[in-house]
Every structure is written in C-alpha cells, then in structure tokens.
C-alpha cells in the first residue's frame, strides 16, 4: 500500500479528531497550529460553524486524547461541512480516503460505533490492535494479565527493553494511542470474566486455553445480540484462526465489488428472453445472478424494478427466466445492473466446531492434507500446556514425542474424520517452535484477524467460515538444525532463534538489504525487519529510499508516521521510527528515486554488495526498473503489492524463478477520445473529462500565460516553429485568458464561471444535438444515437438549484486564485452570491452549421489540423503582443495544481460539479464528492490489513532467501483477497532455459569478458562458443554489422573506444564496464538469443 513515544502528549498535534460517538472535532484550544492557511481555507472554515454536543466514554484505564485521564474523553466538536456534499460530517475524509475507497461510508460508520476487545498482547495481539486502531473503530480494550519478557521483543513492536517487567497491555497503550487519537484505548489487567464481554461487539483472543475459549465462546454465541468471537494463535511457523459470529450472521456485501452492469443492444421477444449487450466491455455476470433493467425503450415491461435471474451467461449476452413473447418490441437503450444479495451464515460454537470443523479453507494445493493435521495439533498443544504448565521446549525430543503422542491420542479418539497418517516431522517442527511468536507470522495473522473483526462489526465482506490453518515450514533452514542451535542466548531474538537457530539469526543480522519505498508497505517491512534483527549486526546495513513526503491521508496505514510528521521526508521519518523499535538497526535513509537518473547514487558497487532487494513500490514502471537492476546484478527481489482487500507477493530468485518483468498484466482499456469529449455513457467518462477541463482552465492556460510573459520572444518563436494545431490552440487560449476572459474583480470571476456553465452544459449540448439530431442516421443507415451513445439534453441554469450555484462558487473562487484576486466575505452569503450571479448577462446561443465534431473512436486528438495553421499563428502572435501592452506591470498568473487530498481548496468541488453537470446532460447517475475524488484523483484503495498480510508473507520468504539453500519448490508466490476470503499459494515459475551446444542459459545469465577486448577478440570469443556474431550494438547505436564492409576496419579497435567514439557513450569514473547486445547465429544460420554481454575495461 508502517509506539513508541516521539514526545509527550502535550506535543500531540490534533488538527481534526473524531470523538467517541463519531462526531468530528477540531484541535483543542492552545495547541500549536502547524499549518499556514490560505484565504480559501479560511473562507471555508468560516462557513462551518454549527455546534454539537460531546460524549463521554468510561472504562477501566483509558488514554484520553488531551490529558491522559483515567475515566473519560471529552472534546469540543464542530461539524465540518463539505461544499456540495453534506452527507458525511462524521468521517475525516482527508485521513480515511483510501480506506473509504474500500469500505464506503456506511461500513466506516459501523466501524466507528464498534467496541473491540483484544486479549493477549504478544506480537499477534499487538498487530491486530494496530490494524483496528488504524481502521478507526470506536474503542479498543487491551487485555493481558502477563508482563513483558525479553522473549516478547521478537514480535511486539510496541515493546522496548525498558518495558520488561511491565504489564503487557499497559506497555502498549500509550504507543497504540499515537496511531489514532480518535480511538479510545483502554486496558484490563486482571483475569477476564465472561460477563465483561457484553460491553463489546467483537472479542479477539490470541492467548487463551481451549477450556476458557469454549466458555467465553458459548457466552458470546448465546448472547443477544450475539458477540462476534475470534480465537487466533501463532505458534512458530504455524497459525490458526477460528470465527464464530453467532447463530445467524447476515453478510450484507459478500465481496465488496461494485455491482456489474451492461449496456443493452437488443432483447428478444422469446421464452426465455435473450439479452445482447454492446461489445464495449465483456460482461461479468454469472449464472444465478439477479439483475434489474432500467432505461429500456419499447419493452418497458422490464423497467419494473423486479430482479430477474440470469441463465446462460456469455461474454456479451445472457438469457433471463422471463417470457417476453407478449411484451412490446424492444426499440433501444437499456442498462442491466446486478442486484447484490445478502447472505446468512449459521456459525457453530467452538465446542461443536472442534468435533465437526466442516470444510477447511485450502490455501496451498501442495498441502491439501495439512489443515486436518493442524486442527489436531493446536488441540494437542493446549492439552500439553494444561498438563505440564508450559510450552514444549525447542529442540527437546522428549517434549516432541509427548506432543506427537497427544496428537495421536486425539486422532484415535475421533469417531469421524480420523486421519490415516500422522506426519511426525511436521508435528516435531510444531512442537519445537510452539512458544515462539514470529514477527512475520504475527503481521500476516494480524492482517487476517483484523479484517475478520471489520467484517464482524460491519457485515462487509464474507467471514472466514470457520477454521483457518496455515504453516510455512518451508521457511526453516535448508540444513537440518542442531537442537543446541535453538537454545536461547538471552537476546531479544530468542523466540526467533528457537525456530530458526542462531546461525540463520547471524545471517539476518549481517545482511545488506535495499528497501525501495517507505509508504504503507515500506513501514510494515521496516517494522518486521527491525523485529527480525535484519541488518542489526556489525556487518549489516539496511538502505531505504523514497522521494515522497508524508501527507495526512498516509496516516491511516503508514503507522510509523504521526500527524506532526506531515510534510517531512517519508524515508527519514520511517528510518528513525524503525530505529526506535530496534536500536541496533543499521539503517540509512535516502530521498532518491531509484531510476536511471540516480545510478551515480545506486552505482555498481552499491548493487554488488547487496544480499536482497525488497520492493515497497506503488507503480509498475518503478517495479520494472528495479527488476532489471536485480536481473543485471543477480540479486533476489521480493515483490508485493496491494489493491484494497487484495494483495499479491512474488519471489524473484536468481536462476530459480522468472523475473518480475517476464509476465505483465494487459494494459487498462482507455475510453476513446471522442467518447470522453462528446459521447460519455458512464460517470468515469464524465470525471475524466472534468479533470482534463479543470487542469486546462486552471493550470495549463495560466502556466502558458506565464511562459509567454516570462520570455515573449522565446515563446512566440517556439509557437511559430511548431506551426501546428496545438500551437494555434495554445495561443488562442492565452489570448482568450488575457483579453475577453481576463478578470480584475471577483465579479469578473463570477461572470467567467457563469458563462463557462452556459458554454459547457447548454451551448455545447445544443451544438452537438443540432449537428447530430436525435433521429440522425449513420452512413450505413443505423441510428446515430444507438448504444452505448446517450442523447444529451441542455441544462437550464437556476440559482435555486444548489448544485448549479455551488459549481459557480467553486469555479469563481479558483478563477480568482489564478488572477490573485481577493475573495470578498460576502461570498459566504447565499443570497448575496445568488444576486451577483443573476447580474451576469448571458448571450443567446445559435448553433452553427459547419462545426466538425470528432466521432472516430480511433482519433487521438480532438484539435482539427488546418493548412492555414502557420498563417493563423502569425496573426495570433500580433494579437497577443497587443494584449500584453494592456497588462499591468509585473503581471503574473497563479496556476493551480490539482490536489485531491485537501477538502478545503475547492478543487474536488469544481471537478465533481463539472462531472455531475455533464452527467445530468446525458442522463448518467451522478456521484458525491467522495466517489468523484476516488475516480478523478485516481486514488488506489488501500487498507492496513492487506498490507500487513502481504509484508508478513514476504518476510517468511526472506528467511529462505537469506538462508540461501532453498529449492524452487520451497518458495511461494501468493494472491489473497481478504474480502472473500481467498488465499492462493503456488511455487514460482522457473525462468525459460535456452540451450546451445551443451551450454544453457536463462534471462539471469550475463556473459562477462574482461581485460578490455578489441572487436576482433570479442568476435573470436563468441566463435569459440559456436556463435557467429553479425551485429553488435550499444544502446541504439550500431558498433558492428557484418554486412557493412567499413565496419571490418574496426577489428583492432578496443570495444570501449568504439562505445565512446562511435556511440558517444559517456562512461562515468565509477563505471568499470559497459554492456552490449549481440545478435548471433549458429553454424546453421539459426538465430540464437544470447545473454547480455558485459565488457570490463577497468
């Protein structure tokens, strides 16, 4: 898509907080103001002045947001009004925008009303609590009656050496509170009673006996309403989850996906009726889906809103269980939309589910028999602890045998579901690591369980039903471990050593790691690496780089950051925070984007010294670049990514697996230019157009004006040299801005905005429908306005329409900002602003006959070229010089760069207004400002839980990479969707092997020739391998081709001289080699793909 105290609570910056009841609150009086407000922000703030009442929340030990009192939390609250959207004054959309994109407002509101108990604050409990606090539940109560041990420092990132001996819950609470001041954090430090569970909507237990779990679960299952119960354990490399959300739990949205839709092309009068849709996009319907019809012309009987069941779903058609024989004939139009159905789940209580677990969720097809075995193993571990009062000791064969006998006895006692074979090797690993909570396992299960709590509280997404088991025994060292290597060393890594041994721990500590990116994934990785001890030894070093700075929207996932870090460099803050988790971490933070431009920073020596690279990136191009670097220097690359509740991981291991770039997703389908500009048929088209218009009017044109005014001669020369339609359009826009559309007063800005409204939503539509009337036909005689085209209608402006007026207000305020015009206070008055708008004189519009409108879907430019462009440009330059003479001295405009994450700047108000007015033209359903922000702002949905899952999985692979002896079948790539839930693990794909004369190579191989060879020596070197080189190139320059006689004169020249002399290569001082691409044939003239060749000249 990440605690410790940076300062006392008096230094907290709380610019806007949501209190216990879900109200929005502003920072307390007397707190420092770290931001400089613009006049626009002050204007908006002045308009938001309603009062509301505060709530108290009482519990055992509560961290209050202002004074750390022990009983209540009070805040002064002021509702925040979003212009044009009064739907949500209880959610801080700046903070939670990425999470809102996954859950939606209703789910978030349910979360904000949920009280959660997390019992057991070792690593797993801490991870679950962290994810819930970041999600923004109402309260989290931490329960633990144990004290912090050195052992716990392997997995709980809230603990430090100073906390040893303190109660675990109390040691966590202060640092957990820093993650989100809107969540009430409480503690319970004595033995829990079942009656106390009635205070919560969901309870989570991570360290509880089976007997007690059954007692608590029975209480929760039978409570009215039922209390959602989750039991989860992490034992070494093994983990389990059990969920019981009550006898009848209704899931409102099983997958979280938007309802599928289709645009209808035809409907038959038949039984069953066949519906064909336009081939614009493949249909996603499945047999059994329910759908409703709207906007159908002719066969209007289908517009009754009644859900109908789909049969025979095909990519572009389907049938419905309906006899339309006697319906009216279909004429045109129609939208078909999926109706999502709720699902009722009947959970069994734990005492019943243990005996009859049902189907286990299979995650790894190579381990289809593993879940039933682990079902017995976790029960046997509970019996072991109850009988001996302790966990099995790592490396103790006696304890392992005792544990295996318990598993065998439980299995033998089963009437049904008895296992035919018991895998003693797996159970031995289980026993040895049973006491340890590993950081990667805690992160992984913290993500899974955190998501299950969200499901329990919101009914969003399908819960785990009911047991989930996982293991990663492949992460163990490839060599057999000596039991003596598992003994504790009185270090913070003892838990990890009890599983992996001291030798692998030493490798972890001395590893040299490059982490690229320190956003959501990067924060999680740094936390895990610090806990694992990676790069914490004398020889180790962790380098992290990120060129981004911290924004408010990061704080809901990137948990190493605090609100006082906003505006600071991500990598620097993250590195400092990671060093507080583990003071031995040797970390260097850089602010360089890893790219070809920074290869002087990340040079050959840097790459050659690395042991592994961990990507924490958010875009494909950057991933591909890092992949190529890892391929070149033969370094392992651990890749991961998230999208909402989905995540994936990919292991790239030299010579074992294919590289990241070996397979790519198909490019996303882009809407044709003419569709976006003239024929939109969904809100995405409207928002794409809206953002384009926003940037053109408020950023690009003012920037063009400034470019001209900064250097008129250079600008006009560039336009004359270009001499095309784009240059002509740029000049026309600049002249229009400085001449008839130039604003000197705020009333001028209102006039501009009002006339833009008329131009966009009235005049252009009238022109379009004049050029293409509703009954227009194409050259083939078919209706022009057939699906997916929608016939538009012009709007009728009215100051009584609030959406019209708000669009004018936002546009006029931003127009004033571009001209540096002060915004008067009377803008806040609805009446006065409406009067000012009514003063604007709007000229009548007459459509023109000769207007050309682009309808070709393949066209990439809507600007028509003309043979007269050069002549017109000269005339425009003369006109522009006259405009310049009318400007005041030192006149400059203020271009506005679109910023989606500031709800006070009117940017999204204007874009949403643009899009919704256009949608109204075309009869397309409108969207609120939040949904508009997601689409126009291209916001990637993100939540903390899937990020935690992805990084936990990657770090389980990191053990394998740094151990160094694992085979391909030991590694795992994973795709997971926490919403369904779905987990799919498989071994990576091996690289493609090329063979030639007893030799073989893959994409990982690079041939190296040293001692600065000549061209002739290089050709002979290849000849000895049975290869005839006929072409050698450096970059895009040809150094040698066998067909060019003159190239034979280069035979005695050194390759480095050809690269610098012929190709003009600039080889910096730190570069020891350069690379050439050689095209070869074998002796039978067959082309052979050979590896890249590196020529060392130093």
Image (tube, rainbow, N blue to C red):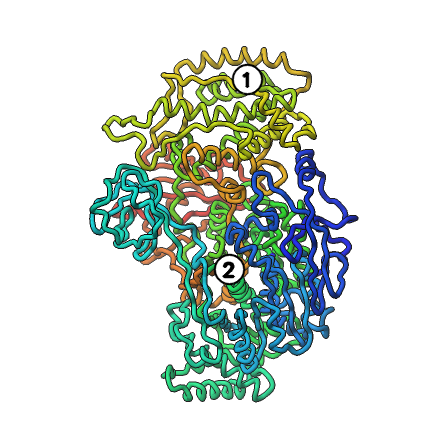
Label 2 sits on a secondary structure element that is helix
Which of labels 2 and 1 is toward the front?
1
Rendering coords of residue 1049 (x, y %): 39, 33
The answer to which quarter of the image holds residue 117 is bottom right
Which of the marked residues, 2 or 1, is nearer the chain's N terminus?
1
Q: Which mark is residue 735?
A: 1
Q: Residues within 10 Å of mark 1 (few under 14, many from 20)?
A: many
Please report the residue visible at 62 percent of the width from the left and 60 percent of the height from the top: 138
Rendering coords of residue 214 (x, y %): 53, 80
Rendering coords of residue 1098 (x, y %): 54, 46
Residue denoted by label 2: 950
Q: Nearer the viewer, residue 330 or 274?
A: 330
Please report the residue visible at 41 percent of the width from the left and 79 percent of the height from the top: 356
Rendering coords of residue 141 (x, y %): 64, 67
Residue 863 vs residue 799: left or right? left
Q: Looking at the image, is 411 positioned above or below residue 576?
A: below
């Amino acid at each position: 898509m990440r605690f410790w105290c940076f300062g006392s609570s008096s230094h907290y910056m709380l610019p806007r907080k949501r209190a216990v009841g879900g109200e929005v609150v502003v920072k307390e009086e007397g707190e420092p103001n770290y931001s400089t407000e613009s006049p626009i922000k002050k204007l908006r703030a002045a308009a938001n002045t309603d009062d509301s009442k505060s709530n108290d929340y009482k519990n055992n030990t509560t961290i209050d947001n202002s004074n750390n009192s022990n009983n209540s939390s009070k805040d002064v609250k002021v509702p925040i009004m979003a212009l044009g959207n009064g739907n949500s004054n209880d959610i801080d959309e700046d903070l939670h925008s990425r999470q809102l994109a996954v859950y939606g407002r209703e789910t978030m509101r349910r979360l904000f009303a949920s009280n959660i108990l997390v019992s057991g604050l070792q690593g797993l409990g801490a991870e679950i609590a962290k994810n819930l606090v970041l999600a923004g539940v109402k309260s989290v109560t931490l329960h633990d009656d144990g004290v912090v041990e050195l052992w716990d420092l392997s997995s709980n990132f809230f603990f430090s050496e100073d906390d040893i001996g303190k109660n675990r819950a109390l040691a966590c609470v202060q640092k957990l509170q820093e993650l989100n001041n809107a969540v009430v954090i409480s503690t319970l430090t004595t033995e829990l009673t079942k009656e106390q569970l009635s205070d919560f909507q969901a309870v989570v237990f991570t360290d509880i006996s089976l007997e007690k779990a059954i007692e608590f679960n029975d209480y929760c299952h039978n409570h009215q309403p039922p209390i959602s119960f989750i039991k989860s354990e992490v034992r070494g490399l093994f983990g389990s989850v059990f969920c019981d959300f009550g006898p009848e739990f209704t899931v409102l949205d099983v997958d979280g996906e938007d309802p599928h839709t289709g645009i209808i092309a035809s409907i038959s009068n038949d039984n069953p009726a066949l519906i064909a849709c336009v081939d614009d996009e493949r249909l996603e319907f499945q047999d059994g889906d329910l759908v409703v019809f709207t906007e159908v012309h002719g066969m209007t009987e289908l517009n009754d809103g009644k859900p109908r069941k789909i049969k025979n779903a095909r990519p572009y058609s389907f049938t419905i269980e309906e006899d339309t024989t006697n319906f009216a004939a279909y004429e045109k139009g129609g939208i078909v939309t999926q109706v999502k159905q709720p699902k009722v789940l009947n959970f069994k209580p734990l005492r019943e589910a243990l005996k009859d677990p049902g189907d286990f969720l299979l995650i790894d097809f190579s381990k289809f028999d593993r879940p039933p075995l682990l079902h017995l193993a976790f029960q046997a571990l509970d019996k072991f602890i109850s009988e001996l009062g302790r966990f099995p000791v790592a490396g103790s064969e006696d304890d392992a045998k005792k544990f295996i006998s318990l598993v065998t006895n439980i299995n033998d006692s089963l009437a049904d579901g008895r296992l035919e074979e018991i895998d003693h090797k797996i159970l031995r690993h289980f026993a040895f690591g049973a006491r340890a909570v590993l950081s990667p396992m805690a992160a992984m299960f913290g993500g899974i369980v955190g998501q299950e709590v969200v499901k329990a509280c919101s009914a969003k997404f399908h819960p785990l039903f009911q047991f989930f088991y996982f293991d990663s025994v492949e992460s163990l060292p490839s060599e057999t471990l000596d039991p003596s290597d598992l003994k504790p060393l009185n270090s913070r890594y003892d838990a990890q050593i009890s599983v992996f041994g001291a030798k692998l721990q030493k490798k972890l500590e001395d590893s040299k790691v490059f982490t690229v990116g320190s956003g959501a994934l990067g924060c999680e990785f740094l936390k895990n690496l610090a806990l694992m001890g990676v790069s914490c030894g004398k020889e180790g070093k962790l380098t992290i780089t990120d060129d981004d700075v911290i924004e408010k929207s990061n704080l809901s996932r990137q948990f190493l950051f605090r609100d006082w870090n906003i505006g600071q460099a991500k990598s620097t803050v993250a590195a400092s925070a990671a060093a507080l988790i583990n003071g031995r971490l040797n970390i260097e933070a850089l602010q360089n984007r890893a790219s070809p431009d920074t290869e002087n920073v990340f040079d050959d020596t840097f790459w050659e010294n690395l042991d592994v690279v961990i990507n924490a990136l958010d875009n494909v191009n950057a991933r591909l670049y890092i992949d190529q670097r890892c391929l070149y220097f033969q370094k392992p690359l651990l890749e991961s990514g998230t999208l909402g509740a989905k995540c994936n991981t990919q292991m790239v291991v030299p010579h074992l697996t294919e590289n990241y770039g070996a397979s790519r997703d198909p490019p996303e389908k882009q809407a044709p230019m003419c569709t976006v500009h003239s024929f939109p048929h969904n809100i995405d088209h409207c928002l794409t157009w809206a953002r384009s218009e926003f940037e053109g009017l408020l950023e690009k044109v003012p920037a063009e004006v400034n470019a001209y005014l900064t250097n008129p001669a250079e600008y006009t020369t560039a336009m004359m040299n270009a001499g095309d339609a784009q240059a002509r359009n740029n000049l026309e826009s600049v002249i229009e801005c400085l001449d008839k559309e130039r604003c000197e007063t705020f009333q001028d800005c209102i006039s501009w905005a009002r006339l833009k409204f008329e131009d966009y939503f009235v005049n252009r539509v009238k022109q379009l429908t004049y050029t293409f009337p509703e009954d227009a036909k194409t050259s083939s005689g078919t209706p022009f306005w057939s699906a997916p085209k929608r016939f538009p209608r012009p709007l009728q402006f009215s100051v009584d329409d609030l959406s019209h007026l708000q669009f004018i207000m936002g546009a006029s305020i931003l127009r004033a900002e571009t001209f540096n015009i002060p915004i008067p206070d009377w803008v806040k008055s609805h009446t006065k602003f409406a009067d000012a708008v009514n003063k604007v004189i709007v000229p009548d519009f007459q459509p023109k006959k000769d207007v050309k409108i682009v309808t070709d879907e393949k066209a990439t430019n809507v600007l028509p070229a003309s043979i007269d462009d050069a002549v017109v440009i000269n005339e425009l330059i003369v006109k522009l010089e006259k405009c310049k003479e009318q400007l005041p001295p030192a006149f400059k405009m203020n271009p506005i760069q679109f910023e989606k994450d500031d709800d006070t700047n009117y940017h999204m108000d204007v874009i949403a207004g643009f899009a919704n007015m256009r949608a109204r033209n075309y009869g397309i359903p409108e969207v609120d400002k939040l949904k508009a922000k997601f689409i126009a702002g291209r916001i990637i949905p993100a939540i903390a839980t899937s990020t935690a899952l992805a990084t936990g999985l990657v770090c389980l692979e990191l053990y394998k990479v740094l151990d160094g002896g694992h085979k391909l079948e030991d590694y795992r790539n994973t795709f997971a969707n926490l919403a369904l839930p779905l987990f799919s693990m498989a071994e990576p794909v091996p690289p493609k092997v090329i063979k030639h004369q007893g030799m073989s190579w893959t994409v990982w191989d690079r041939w190296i020739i040293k001692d600065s060879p000549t061209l002739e020596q290089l050709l002979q070197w290849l000849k000895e391998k049975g290869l005839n080189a006929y072409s050698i190139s450096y970059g895009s320059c040809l150094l040698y081709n066998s067909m060019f006689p003159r190239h034979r004169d280069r035979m005695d020249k050194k390759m480095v001289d050809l690269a610098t002399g012929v190709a003009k290569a600039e080889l910096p001082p730190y570069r020891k080699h350069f690379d050439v691409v050689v095209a070869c044939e074998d002796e039978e003239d067959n082309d052979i793909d050979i590896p890249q060749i590196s020529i060392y000249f130093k």
